[in-house]
Every structure is written in structure tokens, then in C-alpha cells.
């Protein structure tokens, strides 16, 4: 009798908990303690740390970690505030964090976003003239927080310095606006040689960013890489607001420095188990497209994890997979529900052996490097299909 037949016949043999515990072993564990540890580390960066605030960037469902859990864990850790991409994300965060400052990095998509921002006390970035026009159309019941974004060479979002100064004058004279400060974003802060970043900072700081009374405004330039490399530390501004993203999740923004080197701890770990062992004769092929051929008699572990769970399909043969205490190479194509690992040199691997795709034993950065991408993409891509456990 199948489980479903048993249910239909009112013979539930297992409790839901037992059924869950026995189901497909693909699992994502999110570690709130590590998140709090990494946030504390972000707070310690930069020589200006004492006068700075550090917003936790929780866009894209907290880089795939689950924004609700991360927002509450960070709130417990005494977070200064949050940053998200859009007003919709901000409204979700507002429900979990009624009092925290929330910065909206792409600002308003339409006039309505300004009203929502006002009602829910969001801080909207302004990066282009249409957003100012929508704001000018409004009579808002209370001043809305605004960050002015300056393009210093990335050429994605923001006003030029001179247009930015004009926009700033306009914002400072608008009684519906509470100017939080001026911000910019780096294009190359993750690189070992910071020359482009220094050029961007020079462009930014060549201008004075003051209110009408000549008081310095809030300044926000730092993402994880800037914080960790202390790129902006020489500018002894007060009222600095940092925007820490990927480092909070325990991943390194740099190719030349590992997360472990910087004492960051992985927040997401992805687990599964070996569901079959195969012997492949020398010359035998593995998986779709027969892309991998055994050069020797090979013991293969089949793991319940695939691109249907969010594991990258383009991870090539050789990508590290931790199997029961040893890092072994992925071989053949990743399929929707399974992937295959060469465990020939790891004799003790048996059916049911634990597997970690990334986490404590293999960093997500190593997997990303092997798959020709960055951790950000891998983390965001994990689906809701594996069970999730929050600790
Ligand atoms: C996503 C984002 C960040 C965070 O970047 P990390 O590299 O993850 O620290 C900071 N600022 C802006 C504008 C962003 O879009």
C-alpha cells in the first residue's frame, strides 16, 4: 500500500513530522547565529565605525535566505536598519520590523510609491528626474526620507555630480522631504587594486554635500567590499551609513580573499544525501549528454539535489561537493533532481551518506567560482523546493 492509499483509507501511518523527516533529503539550513556574528563584524569595519550606521541589505528575500527570518534575527542582533530594492520589499520588511529605518535602493517606480513611502516611513533613493517629478506632484501628509544617488562612474543609477547638486537644492527646499543624505555605488570595490574605486570616491568627495545651513549630510558609499577593504576609511565624515549585503550571509565579495580569511561564517548551508551508488566501468559515461567519461573504474554517488532545487546546472565536472567528510568532484551534468559525484577515492561512502553542497565544509564562493558565477547568484537562486530549517 502506498502512503497516499493509506491516507485515502484513513490509515495515516505517519505523523506529518515523521513524513517530513523521511521525505526527500534535500534541505537548506539557515543559521541565525552566524548572521548575527557577520553583522557584528560588519559593524566593526572602517575607522569611522563609531559614527556610522550599518544597514543590513535584505533585498531578494535576503539574498535567498528568507527575509522574514533574517529581519527578525538581525533585529534581535540590534541592527541599525535595512535596505531593500523596491517599495514592495520594504513593505514586507516594515511588517516584521515596525520601527527600523528602511532604505529603498531603487526608489519609487511610480507616484504611488511616494505615498506608500510616506505612510510607512521608508527612505527612498532618488536617482533620476522622473522620481523627482512624481514627488513634486504629491502633497504628502508628512516629510518622506530621501537619499540622493550620485553616479560616480558606474553608469547604472544616479545623477551626475552637477545634476545631483541641482536636485539636492530642489529636495532641500521641498517641505515634503527629509533629506537623509547622499549616496553612491561602487563598480569595482571587489577588485584587488582599488584604483577605479578611488577614482569614484574622488569624484564623489570633490563636491560638498551640505544642507542649506552648511551642515554635512549623511553619506552612504560602502557595500560589503568597501567595508571589508576599508576603502572609504580615509574620509572622516560623520554620519556614515553603510550598506552591508553579501558579507552578512557569510560570503566573500572578493575573488582574492576567502570568507574564512575574514572570519565570516556561512549562513546558508545546503544539504542532501546519497540515494544510490553506481559502479561505472572504465570508459563508461555519466548523465545527460554523456559529457563525462570514466577514465578508470569509478564509484559514483548519486545525490538528491539538482537544478530544480536551485543548484546551478552549469556547475561543471570538478565542482567540489562534500560527501561524508571529504570533498569530492561533481561529475557529469547536473539534472533537475539529482547530481553525481565521483567518490572512487572515498571508499567508505555508502547509500544515505550525508552531503553538503555548500556551507561549512565547502564555501558557496568555491562552488560559485567553479560554476563561473558569484555567490550572490547561487544564494538567490535556491528554490523553495528543499525543506528549510531555521536555527
Ligand atoms: C545590493 C546593494 C548593496 C549590497 O551589496 P553587497 O555587495 O552585497 O554588500 C549595496 N548597495 C546597493 C546600491 C546595492 O544595490
Image (cartoon, rainbow, N blue to C red):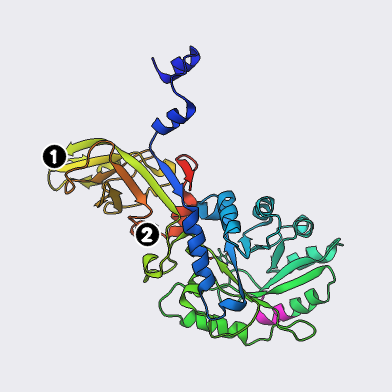
Residue situated in front as seen by the camera: 21 or 302: 21
Q: Is residue 161 covered in magenta?
A: yes
Q: Can residue 152 be seen in this snapshot? A: no
Q: CA distance from mark 1 to mark 2?
A: 30 Å
* Spot occupied by residue 116 in the image (x, y as percentages of width and height): 76, 55
State which quadrant residue 217 falls in. bottom right
Q: Position of residue 194 (x, y in %)?
A: 45, 80
Residue for badge 1: 281
Q: Residue at x 78, y 58 (%)?
A: 111
Q: Choose between 28 and 265: the one closer to the eye.
A: 265
**Circle 2 residue:** 372
Write down the region rendered in magenta.
159-165
Residue 335 in sight in this render: yes
Q: Residue at x 78, y 79 (%)?
A: 169
Q: Is residue 20 above or below residue 218?
A: above
Q: Quadrant of the N terminus?
A: top left
At horizontal 50% and vertical 53% (from top left) the residue drawn is 32
Q: Nearer the viewer, residue 33 or 42?
A: 33
Amino acid at each position: 500500500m502506498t502512503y497516499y492509499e493509506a491516507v485515502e483509507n484513513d490509515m495515516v501511518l505517519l505523523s506529518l513530522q515523521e513524513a517530513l523527516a523521511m521525505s526527500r533529503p534535500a534541505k537548506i539550513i539557515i543559521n541565525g547565529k552566524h548572521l548575527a556574528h557577520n553583522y557584528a563584524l560588519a559593524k566593526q569595519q572602517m575607522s569611522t565605525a563609531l559614527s556610522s550606521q550599518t544597514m543590513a541589505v535584505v533585498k531578494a528575500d535576503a539574498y535567498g535566505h528568507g527575509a522574514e527570518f533574517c529581519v527578525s534575527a538581525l533585529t534581535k542582533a540590534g541592527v541599525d536598519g535595512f535596505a531593500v530594492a523596491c517599495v514592495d520589499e520594504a513593505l514586507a520588511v516594515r511588517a516584521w520590523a515596525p520601527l527600523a529605518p528602511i532604505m529603498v535602493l531603487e526608489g519609487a517606480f511610480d507616484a504611488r510609491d511616494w505615498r506608500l513611502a510616506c505612510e510607512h516611513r521608508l527612505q527612498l533613493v532618488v536617482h533620476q528626474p522622473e522620481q523627482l517629478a512624481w514627488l513634486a506632484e504629491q502633497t504628502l501628509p508628512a516629510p518622506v526620507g530621501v537619499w540622493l544617488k550620485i553616479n560616480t562612474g558606474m553608469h547604472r543609477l544616479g545623477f551626475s555630480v552637477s545634476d545631483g547638486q541641482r536636485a539636492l537644492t530642489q529636495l532641500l527646499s521641498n517641505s515634503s522631504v527629509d533629506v537623509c543624505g547622499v549616496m553612491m555605488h561602487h563598480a569595482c570595490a571587489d577588485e584587488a587594486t582599488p584604483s577605479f574605486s578611488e577614482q569614484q570616491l574622488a569624484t564623489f568627495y570633490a563636491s560638498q554635500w551640505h544642507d542649506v545651513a552648511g551642515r554635512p549630510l549623511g553619506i552612504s558609499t560602502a557595500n560589503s567590499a568597501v567595508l571589508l577593504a576599508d576603502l572609504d576609511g580615509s574620509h572622516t565624515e560623520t554620519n556614515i551609513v553603510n550598506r552591508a549585503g553579501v558579507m552578512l550571509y557569510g560570503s566573500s565579495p572578493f575573488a582574492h580573499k576567502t570568507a574564512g580569511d575574514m572570519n565570516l561564517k556561512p549562513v546558508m548551508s545546503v544539504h542532501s544525501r546519497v540515494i544510490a551508488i553506481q559502479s561505472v566501468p572504465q570508459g563508461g559515461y555519466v548523465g545527460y549528454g554523456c559529457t563525462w567519461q570514466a577514465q578508470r573504474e569509478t564509484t559514483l554517488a548519486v545525490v538528491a539535489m539538482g537544478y530544480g532545487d536551485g543548484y546551478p546546472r552549469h556547475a561543471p565536472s570538478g565542482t567540489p561537493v562534500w560527501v561524508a567528510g571529504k570533498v569530492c568532484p561533481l561529475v557529469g551534468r547536473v539534472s533537475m533532481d539529482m547530481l553525481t559525484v565521483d567518490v572512487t577515492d572515498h571508499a567508505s561512502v555508502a547509500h544515505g551518506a550525508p552531503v553538503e553542497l555548500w556551507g561549512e565544509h565547502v564555501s558557496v564562493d568555491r562552488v560559485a567560482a567553479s560554476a563561473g558565477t558569484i555567490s550572490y547568484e547561487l544564494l538567490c537562486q535556491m528554490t523553495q523546493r528543499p525543506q528549510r530549517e531555521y536555527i
